[in-house]
Structure formats: C-alpha cells, structure tokens
Amino acid sequence: MKKAFYIVIAFLFFAFGATGLKAQGPPTIRVLFIFDASNSMYEQWDHTPKITFAKRVLTELVDSLRTIPNLQMALRTLGADYALSPHRNCEDTRLVVPFADGNALDIEGQIKAIEPKGTTPIAYTLGKCVDDFTPCSNCRNVIILITDGIEECGGNPCDAAKEMEKKGIILKPFVIGIGKEDFSSSYNCVGKFFDVKKEDDFRNVLKVVISQALNNTTAQVNLLDVEGRASETDVAMTFYDESTGARVYNFMHTINDAGNPDTISIDPNRTYHLVVHTIPEVDKHNISLVMGKHNIIAVKAPQGYLHLKMDGDDEYKALYAIIRKADDMQTLNVQGVESTDKYIVGKYDLEILTMPRMYVKGVKVSESTTTTVNVPQAGYVSITKPGAGPISIYSEDGTKMVWLCNLDANPVQQSIIMQPGHYHVIYRSLNIKQTIYTVDKTFDVKPGVSTTVNL
C-alpha cells in the first residue's frame, strides 16, 4: 500500500543527432505531464483524496502556463485505463494529449475526466514517454510526473533513468514528497527530493521548480591567457556528459561584438566535462551549472603560433611536419610547410618529413607571438643505372651508414627530392650474381640544384 504522495519534475534533454545550439532564437519548451491515475490515488492526504488534490494543482498549473510564449504541453496518464482486477496491467500508460500550441483547455478537460483505476508502472511509463518527444533541434524538454511515487510493477525508476542515459537522454528529476513518510532514499539515484508537509509549501516549491524549468540557463567559456584575461577564442569546444561520456554540445568559441566571450544556452541538469580543442587539447571536469543563472566557465588556454617555412622554392610541393610535445612521442598535429597553426604555449619537438627527415627539438611557442622554423631548400637527384636491380640510399653518421630509403628496382632512371647533404647509393645489377660487383657511389645534394648520379 502506498503511503506518500510525490510530484516528480523530470527534465529530459534529448540528443537527436544535433550537437550544439543553432542561432534559431529562443528554444521551444516542451512540458510533458505524466499523471498517476492508479487506484491508490483515492487515498486521503490532509483530509483530501490525493486524486482531488493532484487534479486541482495540475489544472491550476496548466492554466497558469497558457500564455507562456514558446511553450508546448502534452499529457500522458498511467494506471487510468485498466482496473486492478482480475490482474494488474503493467503496461497501462497512454499519451492522452500530444504536444501542440494552445492546447491548455484540452489538457484541463482531460485532467478533469481522469478517474483512478489501475496500478503504477512508473519505470515502464518513463521508458514510453521518450517517444512523446519528436526530434527537435531547438527544444528544451521537461517531464512533470505527478504520482504517489511507489512502483507497483517490479520496475525500477533508477534503472529506467540509466537506460535513458544509454540513449543519450539524461533524467534529473526534482522529487517533491507530500505526506508523513520520507521516501527520499528511494529517489537518491534519480534526482533531488523535497519533503513537503503542507499544501502551501508544495505550491511554493513547485513554483520554484517550474521557474527553473522555464528560464534559460546560460554560460560563457572564458579561455584565459597567461595573465588570466579572457582573450583566447576561435577554437572549437565540446561539452560531454561527465557521468556517461555522451557528447552533448559542439560550439565554436566566439568573442562577441561587446568584446566578451559569447553567451550560450545550456542544459543545467548535467555535470559536464569540457574539452577545448586547442593543440594540445585542454579540458575541465565536473562542471556544474546554477540553474536559471548566468554561469562563468574559466579554462586556462594561452596560445601562440608556429610557422613552418621552406627556404627558397618548396620542391616537395606537399611537405609536412609531425608536431609533438617536447620529449613526448604522442602526435599532436601534422602541419604543412608554408602554414601557420596555433598551439598552447610551451615547447614542442618537430619531425619534418623531408628526405632525410629533419628533427628540431624544443621549439618554444610563446603567447600571441609567431615562432618560425626554417626548412632548408631541397635539391633534385636523378639516378641512372644500367639495368634493373636492388638499390638503396644512405647518409653517413660518422662511420655509421644510416639507411634512408629503397628505390624501385626496375626503372633504369628515377628522380627523388632530397635535403642538402652527402649521401651513398648502393646498387647491384639483378643479372649479376656476384656481390663483388656491388656499386657504392657517393654524391652531394645542394639547395635548388639538380644532381645527376650515373651508376
């Protein structure tokens, strides 16, 4: 037997493939009322049947929301269609009035006609209500569940919430308990519990919750430079749900016309992990927002520029460098020569994909300045051999031969682009089966100059 009476206000923010908020004006707020019409709602609370009190409060609430702009409402019932005998119907839930503009009177009429009948399949109902919200790229979705709060069909609202999370839907209800007993422990896994002992207190709490539901929560992300000023911008950033890892928003950070980080509207019912896609990325965990307020999120992200420049003409046409943090082998970026990219201030190691490769260690990137790394101009090498055969090129490191590349064994003539330096080419004709006829020839490469090597 159910003893207490609850109002559960559940905020559902859906991920329908859209990440980030588009510039579409104010969002449409969609409020779905789920009304418990199970048989236990006939029980008395404060000398009044729970059903009478709940219908009166919900009707007043719907009527008060009629003139709210950008608001749509819908009504779903549970336990309203099938009596308890001969057996419980644990799928007794139905969307009575779908979302539409200006349907308050229809909802009020349906509320007045409700008479308690059946059981209380809360978890099942929460699962079904997901389909009541059609895809929308600019909506904030709210569920208000009016129930005496006790699951009677073996379901678990906590498990239902977890299943919603797997679908990218986060359920964060406010549970308002009316009655003598405190059932907050049953809802700790689902949301925040408010214990209300009097009707007037309930109305006050409900007003606060509705106000939070209807008011936008905003935020600005301050990307801080070395001196703590919010001057960094023009970088993408992603908000993830901290508990599930689900991606929630993608934004391109912007400084607005007033010279401040631009304001974004954001779901306050999540704890976020923010990743700012600088090079390397910076992030901030466990970001909680104050609902209905403007929130400041500060992240240290001082940046400078790295420019790669080829002396003279770029003979390679498409030359790149691998960028890593100093003394760290993880690749951060592959940057083209004759380009400029932005990096978090610090030191970096460069592996430039020339022939042979160039390694530049400890390149310092400073805030708001450009560091230039010069790549010596390459030269052309044309190699001619008397016939097909294995052929490879080496450089010298003291007395040690350092392999650079193998060339195609078949062509008798081929050209490659190489950095200035002193090299060996080692070759043997495929038709000669004696090692003594190996050809080992040295050659030099000069910047911008064509060198011919005849074997």
Image: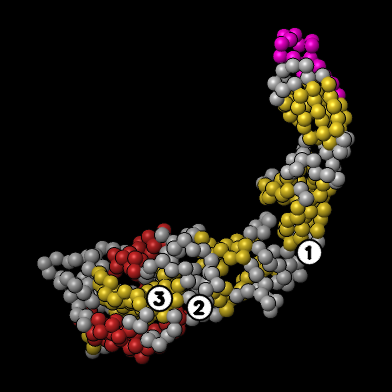
Amino acid type, callout 3: Arg
Q: Element under label 3?
A: strand
Amino acid type, callout 2: Pro
**Residue 112 appears left or right of 66:** left
Amino acid type, callout 1: Ser
Q: Earlier in the sequence, mark 3 or mark 1?
A: 3
Q: Element under label 1?
A: loop
**Res. 256 mark:** none
Residue 397, percent across and down?
84, 30
Q: Residue under circle 3?
A: 30
Q: Earlier in the sequence, mark 2 or mark 1?
A: 2
What's the distance in space between the residues labelled 3 and 2, CA to CA?
A: 13 Å
Q: Residue under circle 1?
A: 368
Q: Nearer the viewer, mark 3 or mark 2?
A: 2
Residue 428 on the magenta segment = yes
Q: Residue under circle 2?
A: 26
**Residue 435 appears left or right of 170:** right
Packing grade of label 2 (10 A; few <14, some 14-19, many >=20) is few
Residue extending farthest to the left is: 86
What's the distance in space between the residues labelled 2 and 1, CA to CA?
A: 36 Å
Span highlighted in magenta in the image: 427-442
- Tell me the residue at 72%/26% (across/down): 406
**Along the viewing direction, whichever of 57 and 108 lies nearer the viewer:** 108
